[in-house]
Amino acid sequence: MRRDDTPLLKAEGLRMWFPVRRGLFASPLYVRAVDGVDFEIRAGQSVALVGESGSGKTTLGKTLLRLYRPTAGRILFEGRDITQTDEGELKWYRARAQIVYQDPFSSLNPFFTVYRILEEPLIILGFKSPGERRDMIIAALSDVRLQPVENFITKYPHQLSGGQRQRVAIARAIIAHPSFLVADEPVSMLDASVRVEILYLLKELQRKYSMAVLYITHDVATARYFTDEMQIMYAGQLVERGPIGEVIDRPLHPYTKALLEAIPDPDPANRYRLRDVPGGEPPSLLAPPPGCRYHPRCPYMQPICREAEPRLEEASPGHWVACHFWDDIESGRLQPLSGS
Amino acid sequence: MLRVEGLRLYYRVSAGPVKAVDGVSFEVRRGQTLALVGESGCGKSSLAHAIMRILPRNVHTYSGHIYFDGTDLMGLSDEELRRGFRWRRLSMVFQGAMNALNPVLTVGRQVAEPLVVHSRMPEREALGRAEEVLGLVGLPPETVHRYPHQLSGGMKQRVVIAMALIMTPELLILDEPTSALDVITQANIINLLKQLKERLRLTYIFITHDLALASELSDMVGVMYAGQIVEIGPAERVYTAPQHPYTLKLISSVPTLRRVARLEFIPGSPPDLLRPPEGCRFNPRCPYTMESCMGQEPPHFNLGSQHTSKCWLHR
Amino acid sequence: MSAPVGLKYTLKTIFFSKSGLLGTAILIGMLLLSAAAITSVPYDVVKTWNNPEAWQDNPRHAAPEWVTLFTGGNPPRTMVIGPRDFFKVSFFVELASLKFIRLEGNFNYQYDDFPSEWAIILDTVFHDSRPLATIHLVRPDGERVLIFRSVLESNRTRLDVTNRAVRSNVLEWLRGLGVEEPKFVLPEVALFAARSPAMWDPRRATPLQGKYGIEVELVSTGRDDDANASAILFGKVHGLAGTDANRRDLFVGLVWGAPIALAFGLSAAVLISFIQAILGSLSAWYGGKVDEVVQRATDIYLILPFLPILITISIVYRIDIWTLIFVVVALSLLGGITKASRSITLQVMQEQYIEAAISYGASRLRILFLYILPRLLPYIVANIVLAVPSFIFLEAALSILGLGDPIVPTWGKIISDAQEGGAALHGYWWWVLLPSTLILLTASSFAFIGYALDRVVNPRLRER
């Protein structure tokens, strides 16, 4: 894996707000799916973007791919500003940045054969020779281990199993050798026994093609196996970021702590203890709480948390956290309030 | 408290019978939790429906014995089952039930409904009971007057649990009660279930595809594959020393947060319940498969301390 | 998951269900009928339909021949005694400078009923003065009746039962026979009735069967004068579908009605379904203002009173059938299908594979045609099938109101003619029943197919 000094993809102050129309005369409300995010990823790096539903992680991934036009902020890919470019000018970016979706069935056109599904991106990206396309399709199918290839190219999605469909989706994403891949919950709709296979496949392909991979998931456990860095999102913002082993072993943000505490390992002793997690639900992105967005649920909440939004600080090399009291919490100076 | 023997449930489709539950036997003691674990299509949901006798129209075969506190439920008529047992003594939380709440009725009325229909309780009293049960599951009293769309996912799931508990059953079957919820909400619901188990002295059958989640509640674990239980035993033994090859592979295919180990995966995919493989159903994917596996279905081998495994390896 | 609903599934549904098969069978019948029409009777029939001369030799208001299956008996069919059936003797007398021509034709009348009318046609060539013609009818009972004696005015003379001279001659003959004083004179009845006091009254007279003769004698002055005679006895039954007031063989009209009805119905249905569907899809695809505008326009179209407007236009401008299609389509550019296809498009747009296509740079147009339209096709096809009968009915309704194409023989036009011709009043049931039945059959066939297609459009009916 080559590592460059300049990041492959960099986003600054990114905001993605979706207007909600409330009739002809009321002023619109906005769903603030991504609300002030700085992000960067290097060539060949794998980053996990972790959050629960409604955290904005999927929107962030899609915004970075310019499937949406950001409301504010900047996105730079290989140094070029792609924030507000029109769709017509973005073709070069589409060839370099791809996505694998969560649902292996609805992300494949049910009326196309596997061959056709894989041929589509090639046709659109301008590979004119059918022979060249055929070679690339066969190569991609071999890459994702759908062999013998002849058996699969004439099949329709509904004739394949979930795992096979997801392989086709991956093949489609990597067929033109992108440098940046967003994998949006690629295995959460697959059976447990198949998940690992697919994740290993992704890892292998990442290495083979030196792709930067953004792995979006709510399953922290899988992230540990496949990524180097983890970023935690809550209510449209990044709350913690760092090397994955370190964040798991030493979580600094109260939300990260709660998230990790909530995840069970297969251990029969679990049934004898209750998990120490806060109640409540993630806030609505229409009207997020003022100040630190986690404050209504945070066991360590202090008055300032209600007023001021915390910024990301570097707690240790590469490990960043957005909390007013992260070091007080870690050192034990600040104790959690009981009964939350 | 509940003993199931040779339960079979086949569905009829145009291509033939689908053997969703094919000869399942197990036992649950009062106050215990049995977790039934398996991947999609292994028949665990069908098993839950079979126990409650909530069957679709295209049933091909429904046979076996379900002994609840000594009474064979299979021998009862639909009316007797409904009157005496269903919801009163054993009830169920369905998969995706939080999305099946009636959007035009208030929560209170929906929770109180079984009381009004079964016990002929006057509505006011039933609503009072509903409020009590909602409090039990951690919801404030005013929830009685709310509509489902006003509640969050976690709150809706609590409502569904309240609905299942309204007639104070002894056994509660939970079919993937947390699958659509966020991790933290899931932990909260699991906490609630643990507390309710103690307070109300409930017995659970907890169905899930998530091995790690199953360990949160289970005293006994049953692993299902292709319509059958392939291994069942105390949680300690099944998790730390699994005996059936499928269980072994399943456990090692689950990524764990705190211990980093090499993950394995199981090649192939779960079998078609229309035409399950000959002999042991796992044999096409089993790394230890032998001659005998392809010819004959193995019986359950008793490995001591209520731990059984259905594999020729134990001969 | 099950296979997606595509065109193949749609077609399979049609052929594998009972009602679909029935509908298709009838439809194929109609298509064969249309093919038969186009190949055996060329399109010129449209011109001949309105040309009375082409139908001269047909009876008026004749019932279909198969009516004998129900009524029994032996109703008269048209008999033609052509020029060659007349035995001609002609000679010129030099001394008197007179030319004599005698034509004699015979026929055998065996029917149970009187002819509906008859006609005798004389084709003459005369160079000098006009000839004097004398026509006698010789009956099987020996009576020789003078029918006509007069100088011919033109080269082609057609004498039929409406001719005053003929009538007065027949009346005289009847009086000479000493029968009841006739209240009216019907030469087609009296001349062929068996001798009886009431032989002039068709209700009481019986036909006289046997050998009849027509004797035509011409006297003229030109040496090279010539003449030919022919006679037609018009029957009361004709062909497979009978005839109408203008002697037109209804079979021709009905058979030609099939392709016209199908063409009209199909072209209107196809055009409208596709136009509406594409507009609805584009409306959803572009969203925003375009969507608003198209939706409101659709609402306006939906409120428009379609039939009254159509009637008004038809009254003011006498439109032909092809202009009618144009007007109908123009009045239906937007409608229910627009809304439905908009819904379908909106739904499909949510599917991830559409977003995936955008992610690898597919242009909007490409997505619209390659991804979205195939999803719309089953719905469009189902709609076409269901819409065809309503357009057939529409055309028929307009024609019956007298507002349709005045020239082209459509089923509706035939029914309209029947209404004007007092078919109900006079009991010409075939004139009304046959075209109505064909309309109903055609519409039903589409309805049957549409019923089978219901599964396609309504997902809940599909087998798991």
Image: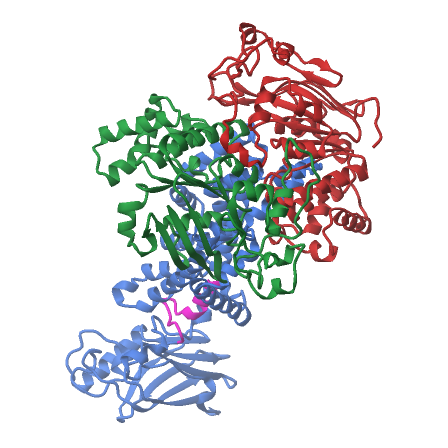
Which corner quadrant of the image does residue C101 belong to?
bottom left
On screen, residue B19 versus residue C282, left or right, reads left
Magenta stretch contains residue C242: yes
Q: Which chain is green?
A: B
Measured from the top left, where is residue B196 in percent x and y?
40, 31
Q: What residue is at 43 percent from the left and 49 percent from the top?
A: B27
| Residue A318: % across, % down | 74, 19
Q: The chain shown in blue is which?
A: C
The residue under the point 59% across, 17% down is: A254
Tell me where residue A187 sits by quadrant. top right
- Asked if residue C150 is positioned above or below residue B195 in the image, the reply reads below
The red one among the chains is: A
What residue lies at 33% left-to-right and 69% top-to-bottom? Answer: C430
Which quadrant does the C terminus of chain B fall into?
A: bottom right
- Give the x, y percent position of residue B293: 61, 62
Does residue C107 appear left or right of residue A326 in this picture?
Answer: left
- Magenta residues span C239-259
